[in-house]
């Protein structure tokens, strides 16, 4: 038997051609799978999302060696292996036979492995163990008896094809008796079955393990391609090793075996072909998602090779090619030369007729959701029967009846589409009838490819009538609007803007884009583009596959419009490469005015490719973040500044600068300076840089260029923390020679500046100025130098303590931001503002608790009482020692009375924001706000009622955790009810309660955007978000600082799971003060709690660079 198994091929079928040497589908060990998880698993498999199926909670990935791992209760196993047709169940069995023939299996040693295909009538109706030995025993006639006496000990039986037994034999047969342990209870048994017939097996008390064959994972597809195309096993192994991911961080986050992009140094054409196909499939993931089925994977490899190393443009073309190849192979046995068959439409009548019959059968049964057919249903296929169904169908036995099905569901869907497109008289009506039917989605895609959707009636699916895909942002108001509007023309458009709101409206658009691409109909691109509201498209946090990027670029490339805004979100190197490759249209009719994009790990070459696209030739506004790449800053800036119509450039660079020749770098910096000087369109420029490389030369070139530029009115430079100092007199020269700059933000710490500044003359007409940076509060040199020479500012942002005589030199200030570190400076500021009539917005940062004195409170109270022009006040309390992660200082309880008394008399304030106010301390105080002068008639005072009625008043409570929790919101409601209680009238009570609730719902009560990934978790949020977590013990052991002893103690004292989690989270946060949400996500990732991981990641308003979740598909 060993000899027989060793020499038989593991893959039994020869069409489509065998793939790989001995490869089969990835397995998922399914235990206690409830119905909801089964439904989700089926959903993912329907779309070829094998990797998602494996990650479902209750699914555990196993290797073939683990199929026969003993359980705790018994060495005698009963294992059910099920899966859809063609997925590789029989191949898995043959793999086990091959493994046994080459030596002992890993977990158990079997004296004999007996393979019993149940489609064999003798095996199906066997009554004794000897009957299962189909081959003549000859010298080993006593073997069955020997095993019988041992009750099957040492024997492994593989019953392949339970679904092929009749219902009677499933109830009463030798196979059923052995499976149920009524006979040979000491042997081990594997039973394979199609999924529809395995339910009875899963109910057996004797079941040890349920294994579901889900097919090839994405990585296994790559391995299969290499093993299939590269016949030299040594070269194949070297190619796999060459592309194995070595970066442990990437491997842990992405669970990646291979690199994201395959390369090879081998000269072998087979290896190069394999690498090209793997990379092509990453782009065409619509094809790749079907390759989880071995049969389809083989089909794709076959067509790829036949097409000379190219995937057809559309899926329709791929399937048309495969079906033609199948028919060619089929007619070799007849008197037809296969080389005369050039295409499906040109088939000779003797083949066209059976194909038409099969297409009609495919469509009729697809409409009835029927995938298998009886012989009776095929009786009308006279011509098809003669031609053996052109090799497109396969047969099997079900309940004693011979059944038929197409090689794969997608084959049936293509043939159904062929019938609709070529033979159905009312193709457009059929398309419309099934358009919203998920079951017909793939079929209609084939219809799009076959008809090109040329009939004008198809345009209704693409003309969406004001399709709103614009960027959606939380409305800005108050202090934020005041100060940003001085620096930026579009203050709401900012990189790293956490006010952005993710839209789910794009999901249905993706389906339209895919149909559009499949049809290759450029007119539909124009129809869809014209229907998009304001010609603005936002992909913020929209997860796109590479194929989606291909479809999007096809649409934009043929849209024939000017796009007012394209927000492409986070774009990887591969995504950018696919997107730009599709932008081949050089027509100046297709343009983009504003581009927002974040490029992940870009290169000089990719940046150049993006900016050279004709789409951006007339771009006016560009907001771009370049994350963690290797590129030369001055070269990148030159590329952006060469855009001829650019008016606004915001550029964030976070990089490691590659080694560049010093002379070349110096020349490019000089070129950059000259380029900025001569630029006649640029008006606003913001350069933000983080990194430890030399950047000073580039910054100097920018400042020198702006010095002689005649159009730039706003310049922001956010310099590095570590870099060589700037050259002398660069800033002095800017202030002297530039006569257009109105807003200047220099976020440069002192140690990057010259030791002294010699400002003699200022001609720059500045109205807005920002000096220093929040994380480096040592900008005294530049602050003192600039403020003493610049006059007449309207907006001033300082990061150094309040300078004396500020309002004498700047009496017209409208917006002011500055820190207060002494009580004296606070008193001086608040005293001046008691009589100031120009300042509209104030932001102060309290850096020391010593500032909160009664004298400061009195001056603040007087300012609020007497000043009737201030509309917005923000107070941020931050310890100076905490530079990287600021820690808020709560307002002392004694200080609140000053604040509330002042607010009681104030009639102008529209916004008050404090970080951090303890809301519980304010519950009683807030009730008196603006109601001390309540008229005798019981009506509310005009000032507050007017403010509420006009939706001016903004309450902004920010808790220490950085998020308004349910408890805090209840405190807010309680506080407002206390306030309303002073009114006395029930009608007033209802009036103001409704108004307050409307304020909450309208969004004017601003909730802080939420915790970030590196914030310390709040225990209430931990309990809320991790409520679905069942195995809290294993999760807890992955939290830094938690030990097994901690878990044991919690288990001993906690009553239920909730108490256990409270104990776990409390102990963790107490023991590990540096705990962050990142630790929580890492623990969930290691536990493979993918659903929870995704849910919490969505809740965390984290910049996408913090943890890239599209890697988990969680795309």
Image (spheres, rainbow, N blue to C red):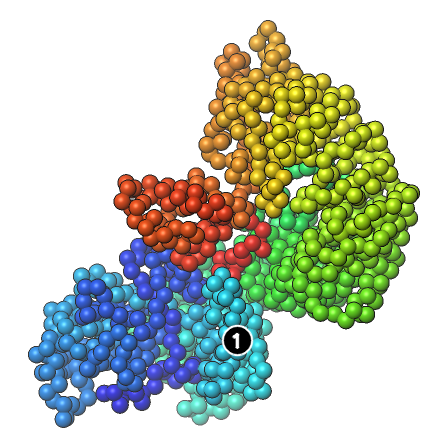
Residue, far left: 149
Q: Position of residue 821 (x, y in %)?
A: 67, 33
Q: Which residue is mark 1?
A: 243
- Please give the name of the residue rendered at 39% of the width and 44% of the height, measured from the top-left corner: 1067
Q: Is residue 570 visible?
A: yes
Instruction: Answer above or below: position of 499 versus 71.
Output: above
Q: Is residue 66 left or right of residue 843?
A: left
In the figure, residue 771 lies in which quadrant? top right
Q: Position of residue 795 (x, y in %)?
A: 77, 36
Q: Position of residue 358 (x, y in %)?
A: 41, 74
Query: Which of the two residues, 944 or 176, is positioned nearer the viewer here?
Result: 944
**Which SS class for mark 1?**
loop
Q: Is residue 734 left or right of residue 375?
A: right
Query: Which of the two residues, 538 or 1100, is positioned nearer the viewer here?
Result: 1100
Q: Position of residue 852 (x, y in %)?
A: 62, 27
User: How many numbered markers are drawn?
Assistant: 1
In the figure, residue 3 lies in which quadrant? bottom left
Query: Which of the two residues, 451 or 965, is positioned nearer the viewer here?
Result: 965
Instruction: Answer above or below: position of 416 versus 37.
Output: below
- Please give the name of the residue rendered at 20% of the width and 77% of the height, measured from the top-left corner: 156
Within-10-Å neighbours for mark 1: few <14, some 14–19, many 20+: some
In the figure, residue 577 lies in which quadrant? bottom right
- Please give the name of the residue rendered at 69% of the width and 52% of the height, measured from the top-left corner: 721
Rendered-image quadrant of the N terminus: bottom left
Q: Is residue 530 visible?
A: no
- Please give the name of the residue rendered at 53% of the width and 35% of the height, measured from the top-left corner: 959
Residue, far top: 936
Q: Is residue 405 left or right of residue 833?
A: left
């Amino acid at each position: 038997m060993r000899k027989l198994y060793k020499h038989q091929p593991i893959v039994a079928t020869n069409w489509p051609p065998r793939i790989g040497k001995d490869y089969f589908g990835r397995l998922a060990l399914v235990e206690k799978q409830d119905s909801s998880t089964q439904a989700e698993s089926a959903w993912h498999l329907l779309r070829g999302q094998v990797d998602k199926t494996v990650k479902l909670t209750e699914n555990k990935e196993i290797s073939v060696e683990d199929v026969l791992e003993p359980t705790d209760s018994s060495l005698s196993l009963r294992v059910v292996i099920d899966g859809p047709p063609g997925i590789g169940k029989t191949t898995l069995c043959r793999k086990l036979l091959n493994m046994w023939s080459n030596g002992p299996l890993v977990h158990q040693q079997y004296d004999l492995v007996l393979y019993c295909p149940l489609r064999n009538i003798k095996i199906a109706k066997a009554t004794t163990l000897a009957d299962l030995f189909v081959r003549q025993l000859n010298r080993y006639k006593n073997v069955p008896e020997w095993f019988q006496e041992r009750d099957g000990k040492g024997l492994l039986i593989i019953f392949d094809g339970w679904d092929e037994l009749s219902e009677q034999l499933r109830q009463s047969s030798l196979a059923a008796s052995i499976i149920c342990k009524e006979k040979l209870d000491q042997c081990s048994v594997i039973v394979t079955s199609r999924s529809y017939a395995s339910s009875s097996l899963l109910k057996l008390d004797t079941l040890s393990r349920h294994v579901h064959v889900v097919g090839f994972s994405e990585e296994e597809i790559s391995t299969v391609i290499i093993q299939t195309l590269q016949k030299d096993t040594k070269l194949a192994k070297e190619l796999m090793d060459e592309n194995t991911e070595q970066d442990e961080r990437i491997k842990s986050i992405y669970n990646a075996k291979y690199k994201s992009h395959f390369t090879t140094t081998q000269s072998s054409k087979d290896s190069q072909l394999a690498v090209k196909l793997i990379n092509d499939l990453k782009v065409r993931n619509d094809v790749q998602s079907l390759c989880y089925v071995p049969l389809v994977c083989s089909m794709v490899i076959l067509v790829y090779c036949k097409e000379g190393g190219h995937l057809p443009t559309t899926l329709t073309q791929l399937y048309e090619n495969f079906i033609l190849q199948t028919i060619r192979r089929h007619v070799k046995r007849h008197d037809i030369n296969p080389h005369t068959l050039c295409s499906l439409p040109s088939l000779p009548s003797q083949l066209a007729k059976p194909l038409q019959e099969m297409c009609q059968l495919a469509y009729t049964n697809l409409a009835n959701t029927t995938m298998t057919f009886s012989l009776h249903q095929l009786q009308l296929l006279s011509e098809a029967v003669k031609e053996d169904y052109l090799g497109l169908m396969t047969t099997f036995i079900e309940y004693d009846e011979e059944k038929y099905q197409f090689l794969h569901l997608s084959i049936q869907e293509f043939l159904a589409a062929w019938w609709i497109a070529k033979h159905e008289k009312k193709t457009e009506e059929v398309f419309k009838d099934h358009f919203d039917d998920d079951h017909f989605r793939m079929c209609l895609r084939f219809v799009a490819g076959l008809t090109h959707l040329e009939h004008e009636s198809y345009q209704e699916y693409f003309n969406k009538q004001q399709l709103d895909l614009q960027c959606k942002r939380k409305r800005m108001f108050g202090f934020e609007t005041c100060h940003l509007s001085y620096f930026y023309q579009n203050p709401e458009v900012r990189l790293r803007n956490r006010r952005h709101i993710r839209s789910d409206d794009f999901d249905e658009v993706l389906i339209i884009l895919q149909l559009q691409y499949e049809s290759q109909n450029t007119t539909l691109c124009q129809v869809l583009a014209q229907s998009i509201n304001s010609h603005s498209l936002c992909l913020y946090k929209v997860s796109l596959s590479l194929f989606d990027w291909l479809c999007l670029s096809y649409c934009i490339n043929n849209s024939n419009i000017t796009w007012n805004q394209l927000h492409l979100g986070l774009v990887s190197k591969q995504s950018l490469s696919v997107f730009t490759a599709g932008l081949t249209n050089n027509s100046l009719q297709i343009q983009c005015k504003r581009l927002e994009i974040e490029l992940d790990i870009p290169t000089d070459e990719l940046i150049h490719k993006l900016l050279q696209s004709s789409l951006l030739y007339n771009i006016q506004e560009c907001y771009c973040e370049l994350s963690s790449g290797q590129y030369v800053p001055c070269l990148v800036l030159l590329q952006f500044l060469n855009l001829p119509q650019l008016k606004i450039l915001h550029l964030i660079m976070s990089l490691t600068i590659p080694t560049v020749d010093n002379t070349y770098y110096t020349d490019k910096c000089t070129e950059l300076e000259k380029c900025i000087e001569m630029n006649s369109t640029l008006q606003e420029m913001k350069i933000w840089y983080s990194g430890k490389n030399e950047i000073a030369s580039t910054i100097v070139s920018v400042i020198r260029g702006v010095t002689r530029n005649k159009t730039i009115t706003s310049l922001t430079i956010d310099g590095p923390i570590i870099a060589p100092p700037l050259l002398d007199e660069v800033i002095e020269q800017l202030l002297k020679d530039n006569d257009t700059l109105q807003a200047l933000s220099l976020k440069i710490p002192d140690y990057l500046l010259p030791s002294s500044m010699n400002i003699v003359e200022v001609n720059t007409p500045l109205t807005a100025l920002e000096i220093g940076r929040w994380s480096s509060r040592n900008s005294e040199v530049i602050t003192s130098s600039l403020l003493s020479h610049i006059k007449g500012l309207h907006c001033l942002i300082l990061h150094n303590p309040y300078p004396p005589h500020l309002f004498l030199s700047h009496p017209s200030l409208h917006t002011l931001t500055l820190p207060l570190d002494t009580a004296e400076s606070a008193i001086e500021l608040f005293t001046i503002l008691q009589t100031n009539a120009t300042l509209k917005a104030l932001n102060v940062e309290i850096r020391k608790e010593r500032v909160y004195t009664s004298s400061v409170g009195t001056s603040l109270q007087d300012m609020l009482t007497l000043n009737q022009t201030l509309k917005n006040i923000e107070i941020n309390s931050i310890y100076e020692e905490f530079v990287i992660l600021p820690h808020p200082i709560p307002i002392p309880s004694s200080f609140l009375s000053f604040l509330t008394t002042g607010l009681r008399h104030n009639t102008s304030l529209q916004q008050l924001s404090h970080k951090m106010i303890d809301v519980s301390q304010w519950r009683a105080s807030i009730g008196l706000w603006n109601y001390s002068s309540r008229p005798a008639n019981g009506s509310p005072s005009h000032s507050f009622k007017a403010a509420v009625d006009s939706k001016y008043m903004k309450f902004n409570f920010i808790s220490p955790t950085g998020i308004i929790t349910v408890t805090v919101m209840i405190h807010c409601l309680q506080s407002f009810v206390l306030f309303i209680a002073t009114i006395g009238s029930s009608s007033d009570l209802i009036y103001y309660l409704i108004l307050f609730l409307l304020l909450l719902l309208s969004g004017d009560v601003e909730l802080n955007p939420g915790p970030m990934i590196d914030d310390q978790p709040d225990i209430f949020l931990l309990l809320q978000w991790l409520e679905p977590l069942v195995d809290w013990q294993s999760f807890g052991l992955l939290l830094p600082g938690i030990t097994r002893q901690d878990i044991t103690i919690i288990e001993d004292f906690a009553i239920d799971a909730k108490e256990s989690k409270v104990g776990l989270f409390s102990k963790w946060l107490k023991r590990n003060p540096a705990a962050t949400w990142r630790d929580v996500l890492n623990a969930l990732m290691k536990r493979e709690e993918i659903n929870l991981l995704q849910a919490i990641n969505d809740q965390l308003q984290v910049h996408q660079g913090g943890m890239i979740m599209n890697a988990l598909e969680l795309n």
